[in-house]
Amino acid sequence: MATQNYKVIPRKPLRWWEKLYIPQVIAGMKITLGIMLRKPVTLKYPEERPTIPKGYRGIPTLVKDQNGREKCVSCQLCEFVCPPKAIRVTPGEIDPNAPDAEVIEKAPKAFEINMLRCIYCGMCQEVCPEEAIWLQNEYSLNGYSRDSLVHDKEKLYELGGTLPDKHLKWKKKAEAQAHGPAH
Amino acid sequence: MSEEQPNLVTINIDGKDYQVAAKQNLVEAAKSVGIEIPHYCYHPKLEMAGTCRMCLVEIGMPMRDRAMGAPVLNEDGSPKIGWMPKPAIACGTSVSPNLHMKTKSPMVQTSRASVTEFLLANHPLDCPICDQAGECTLQAFSADYGNGKSRYRDAKNVKPRNKSVGPRVLINNERCILCRRCVRFCREILKRPILGPIQRGSMTQIDCYPGQELDGNYSMNVVDICPVGALTSKDFRFKMRVWFLKQTKSICTESSVGVNTTVWSREGKIYRITPRRNDSVNDTWMSDSGRMIYKTVDDENRLTGTRRGESSVDFDEAIDAARALLSAGKPAFVASGKMSLEEQWALKTLAASFGGDVYLTQTLAENDGFLISEDRTPNRRGALVSGLVKDFESASVAKLGAAIDAGEVKTVFVCGEDLLEQGLDAKQLKKVDIIYLGTHKNATSEEATVVLSGRTVFEKSGSFVNQQFRLQRFDAAIPGIAGTHNELDVIAALAARTITDASVETIWLSMNKDCAALAGLEFASIPADGVLLDASPWAKLAFPETGSLLYKPAGK
Ligand code: SF4
Ligand code: SF4
Ligand code: SF4
Ligand code: SF4
Ligand code: FES
């Protein structure tokens, strides 16, 4: 190995008032006292919770529309786009007797998000053509086993709840169906 | 301009001269020089229809003086091009010398955008639930050539969705762009007009003629040729999005036709099989039954693991037991046309090292006159090419029966065939020890003393020789399922002294020295559409095939 050139810089000896330590203690106490008198910035988590800013990206969930219909049609775009491959969708056909079966045809048979893989990037929400997958404000996630952190379809809907839909694309389709030929 | 070669003409595309083959249309000519002309209704294997108008281009010819016939020149001396005032369809125009074509001009671009706008006027917003998404030409061309937004404010037409037109095919008429490829397929290829348009104008739909159904064994080809998601496969419906699927080139094992296929798989699971174009074998078609062969991979009869007598044993123990049986003397080997060429060659080496006769099975059924021949194995001719048997007559399984009765055989090594189906009887099977190497259970594997589980065509690579003596290669689409072994590894383990490396490539190195027909060939360089081998050494042999699409046996 090549020899390294270095210079030893000797530590300067303490001066007499530095040896007293008192000025340093006072300076420290000043900071402590100053902060004691300020409004505290820490929260007593978990009793106290922070306010979540708008656009926060918490855990991804699936939502239903105001009619209680599942919005996801298992197009698998979120599965494709998810960078850490946390999503796994098993596409399926919806029950042919369901009221909207004629117009929707497709829904997930199974839907899994592995929260141990998820990096909360929000790509799934951005890509979803049906606005079915949303990142919520929830951030605190824990479980007793690895399996319990793989959210299945039921869990995802439970966490997601309802999100009113402005477009109701499939309802329009059903109405057009009832209306018949347009031109 | 360069010298014109026979069968080549010079055409000018977007200001550049190209030499292209004569007697083709402009879509193909442009494609041959790497220029895409978007099209829906044109299909290389169907008659031209000109219904979609997506392929509109500007076409012109050098002008000539009407009276004198002399070329009209521009001021700078270049020939003056007479452009047609309106765009014309490229699919319906043949190449001709000095033809000029514009594929990027403003007129062409507006034509494409307008055609797209009309097609999308009534098109549903179905891509998220449409099986064609990802391989839909309407989706792709709308993105490439469309306007990017809709000006259409009226209600869309409603047409029957999700309607069954046959046992394996569904139609969604809202997605249909009325290119009529499916109609032409029925009329020209099936020679049975089943599908046709009904109603008029914007309500036109594709449906079956009264009392007809899209049945038969070639119905799923309409799913492949439909440029949109109107005709979809019931089998593949909502199974997987195509962008997740890996495509592997393969060969159909249904018969000696050797249909070229693409196997679509994801993470070790096969989702569908589609035909792969080969203009010398199957054009772009394939049977429905051939598409379903992937289901045999995890069939309930699939053999996994190794067995000796009644008990499961590990691989090495089974190999030792098999070697002991083969070494005990009087072995016989039963080969099959289902084996790959490499396996047949390896079996030849194995048989030579233990000194036993080789018999070759035969599986015959009716020819369907299109893409399924009499010989229902993909590689019976491979047994001749690899030198496994000299001719079919002397290797017939009937001779094995006689040899067993005469006590000349003590052990039979069977590759994937059921000897009962091949004409032996249960009593004869009881007289010998059987070593069975195959993928699925059958009466012979049940009788076997040692069972070794092999792999299906999807789980290994190799090559087949089809009825035309065309050598075609297939690649492994998925890894072998647990408990199975590549046949080549099994045979190599049994013939430990003669085959040291069982990879397909190494086997080829020995094989092309040993087999005259394969001289100079290499596994890695077998082209995608196969190579025709020299079949003259076997010209005198009788083959069962009576011909299929693109194949007529000599003298029949
Ligand atoms: S938030 Fe990002 S990482 Fe998490 S599931 Fe969605 S796409 Fe995947
Ligand atoms: S959540 Fe959205 S993107 Fe994911 S499969 Fe369902 S519809 Fe498609
Ligand atoms: S046919 Fe093509 S454009 Fe139409 S819904 Fe299906 S994928 Fe989308
Ligand atoms: S069903 Fe498909 S192939 Fe047939 S006319 Fe419609 S778009 Fe063309
Ligand atoms: S491809 Fe030329 S008109 Fe359809």
Image: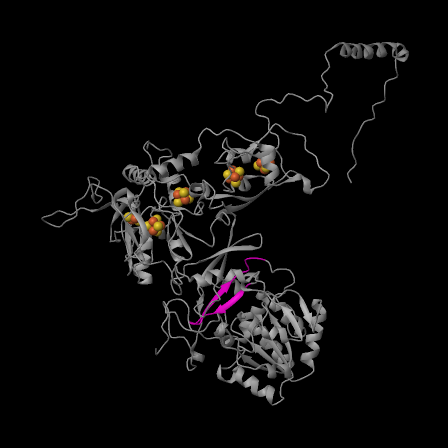
User: Residue A72: x and y, percent?
Assistant: 51, 38
User: Residue B416: x and y, percent?
Assistant: 57, 72
The furthest residue to the left: B67
User: Residue drawn 22% across and 40% down?
Assistant: B76
User: Residue B264: x and y, percent?
Assistant: 50, 54
- In this view, the residue in front, B478 or B240, is B240
Instruction: Give the quadrant of residue A162.
Output: top right
User: Residue drawn 68% across and 22% down?
Assistant: A49
- In this view, the residue in front, B130 or B67, is B130
Instruction: Give the quadrant of residue B453.
Output: bottom right
Answer yes or no: is residue B29 visible.
no
Answer yes or no: is residue B278 visible.
yes
The residue range painted magenta reads B461-478
The furthest residue to the bottom: B406
Colour convention: one colour
Q: Is residue B231 above or below residue A169?
A: below
Picture mark count: 0
Magenta span includes B236: no
User: Residue B445: x and y, percent?
Assistant: 61, 73
Q: Is residue B486 above or below residue A2?
A: below
- In this view, the residue in front, B318 or A96, is A96
In this rendering, would B462 be left or right of B532? Answer: right
Q: Is residue B209 above or below residue B486?
A: above
